[in-house]
Image (cartoon, rainbow, N blue to C red):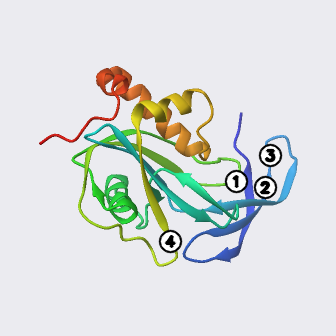
Amino acid sequence: MEPWHTNESRYIVEDSWLHLRADTCRTASGAVADPYYVIESSDWVVVVALTNKHEVLFVRQYRHGMAKVLLELPCGIQEAEGASSDGAVRRELLEETGYTALHLIHLGSHDVNPARFNNRMHSYLALDVTSEGMPRPDHTEELQIERRPISETFMELNRGILDLQPMHLVALYRAQAWLQENQPDVLDSRAKQPTA
């Protein structure tokens, strides 16, 4: 199978958040797609953050695209071209929750929506996160932090009742698989009581 040939590209929108590009394309069989819209965006990061009490950190925030308040994992964009996704995860975790990660595990990367977007999502697991103070959200973000026991989180995930956007579900499934292979005792535990 051969890739399409792009005869022409023009930008419809160019701003700090995204670029909307309209391409004139020809398939290998000669069919023409005009315009074919592509959204150019920076890569995204998402993190499954676990406290030493075996709790998963979530944030609730308003998302204007859906016009409602949603439950999410800490997430954001990899702001600088060529910046590390590890650095973006640490920054977003601190900004959105006030927590830092002692251990970061890269769970993998995948295309966001290859039909229309040109970016990737990088999923992480953060172990033994600790609070370093108050969150520092962006000026348009209003966040509520929720800590949920890992056993409850994965039970709801596996029963299909945890209502999250698909890329966050992927991160949770990947975290669950990593924990099953490397730290199965964490999945069997209930939220731990604080240690003295």
Residue 161 position, x and y percent, is: 62, 35
- Crowding around mark 4 (Cα neighbors within 10 Å: few <14, some 14 to 19, many 20+) is few
Q: Where is mark 4, residue-wise?
A: 141
Q: Residue furthest right?
A: 31
- Cβ–Cβ under 8 Å for marks 1 and 2: no
Q: CA distance from mark 2 to mark 3?
A: 7 Å
Comparing labels 2 and 4, the label whose residue is closer to the camera? 4
Residue 25 is tagged as 2
- Residue 46 visible to the viewer: yes
Q: Say whether disc 1 or disc 4 marks the residue closer to the N-terminus.
A: 1
| Side (left or right) of 162 relative to 149 | right
The kind of secondary structure element at disc 2 is strand
- Cβ–Cβ under 8 Å for marks 2 and 3: yes
Residue 34 occupies which quadrant of the picture?
A: bottom right
Q: CA distance from mark 3 to mark 1?
A: 16 Å
Residue 82 position, x and y percent, is: 38, 61
Q: Where is mark 3, residue-wise?
A: 27
Q: Where is mark 1, residue-wise?
A: 116
Comparing labels 4 and 3, the label whose residue is closer to the camera? 4
